[in-house]
């Protein structure tokens, strides 16, 4: 038997071809009236052939089943800077149900050129807190937790509790290694991305896969961006690839990027490197 709020959704939904459409605000209002998380209302709607209006333009690509899976997913985003801020924006708009943000840094003047969440008004603010507020302003159905701390071997495993996926938007190797080690212990995949100058790389690393830095002798703590700089366009490009891989995996869409994708945005040279050999 349908609950009253479920019946309201069914009666209000407007038929749109293969699915029905309902206002996202109605979902939100019903959740508030019933005292339940808005995310749960949206999941129920998707599972019953009803698309909350905010996701209408995604359904042709992801389907209602894929959208429901995204809303049920939990993701750890490590790093809320150049890559992380852009990834957070895309995940929020896609409707990832739970996002945990981890970053110990505060915004500085030199972040203004490329970090989406950084503004002249929030210089000095913790990146996690500013990113959390941004996500909430985009999609109130997303449940966000923030930790203003650095990823390390001491805390990575605990931070990954109940996560389905982790995303590497980090800028130092020790944190990256700690995150991958914890992901392997938990048996969850890691979406990796790194940038510097015109260059960037990305891949989806499964627990049994090898990371690119495990195939090379990389001793530097900081990445190449310390020498090559970080213009605004490279993080946007790589962040989009990372978000795509996360969304594909969580929505159950095949064809993961298991090879390392190297991108040179100066020459538009793209190479895929098999790291399994």
Image (cartoon, grey):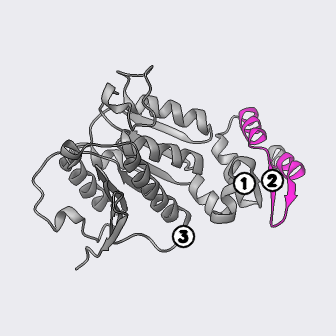
In the image, farthest residue toward the bottom = 277
Q: Earlier in the sequence, mark 3 or mark 1?
A: 1
The one nearer the camera, 123 or 130, is: 123
| Residue extent of the magenta highlight | 6-34
| Secondary structure character of the magenta stretch overall | helix
Residue that appears at 84% across and 44% down: 4
Residue that appears at 71% across and 60% down: 47
* Label annotation for residue 253: 3
Q: Locate the N terminus by quadrant.
A: bottom right
Location of residue 269 with respect to 44 vertically, above or below: below
Q: Earlier in the sequence, mark 3 or mark 2?
A: 2
Question: Gap between marks 3 and 1, in whole Å?
Answer: 18 Å
Residue that appears at 40% across and 37% down: 115
Q: Nearer the viewer, mark 1 or mark 2?
A: 1
The one nearer the camera, 148 or 60, is: 60
Which residue is under mark 2?
Answer: 21
């Amino acid at each position: 038997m349908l609950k009253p709020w479920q019946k309201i959704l069914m009666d209000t939904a407007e038929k749109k071809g293969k699915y029905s459409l309902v206002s996202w605000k109605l979902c939100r209002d019903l959740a508030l009236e019933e005292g339940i998380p808005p995310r749960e209302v949206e999941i129920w709607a998707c599972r019953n052939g009803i698309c909350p209006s905010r996701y209408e333009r995604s359904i042709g690509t992801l389907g209602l089943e894929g959208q429901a899976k995204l809303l049920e997913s939990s993701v750890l985003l490590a790093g809320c800077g150049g890559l992380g801020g852009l990834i957070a924006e895309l995940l929020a708009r896609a409707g990832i149900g739970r996002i945990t943000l981890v970053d110990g840094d505060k915004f500085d003047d030199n972040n203004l050129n490329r970090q989406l969440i950084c503004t002249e008004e929030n210089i000095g603010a913790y990146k996690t807190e500013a990113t959390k507020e941004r996500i909430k302003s985009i999609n109130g159905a997303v449940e966000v937790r923030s930790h203003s701390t650095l990823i390390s071997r001491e805390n990575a495993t605990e931070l990954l509790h109940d996560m389905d996926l982790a995303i590497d938007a980090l800028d130092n190797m020790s944190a990256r290694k700690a995150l991958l080690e914890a992901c392997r212990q938990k048996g969850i995949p890691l979406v990796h991305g790194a940038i510097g100058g015109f260059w960037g790389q990305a891949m989806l690393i499964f627990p049994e896969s090898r990371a690119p830095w495990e195939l090379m002798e990389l001793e530097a703590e900081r990445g190449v961006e310390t020498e090559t700089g970080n213009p605004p366009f490279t993080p946007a490009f790589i962040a989009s690839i990372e978000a795509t891989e996360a969304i594909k995996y969580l929505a159950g869409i095949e064809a993961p990027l298991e090879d390392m994708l190297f991108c040179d945005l100066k020459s538009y040279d793209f190479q895929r490197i098999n790291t399994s050999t």
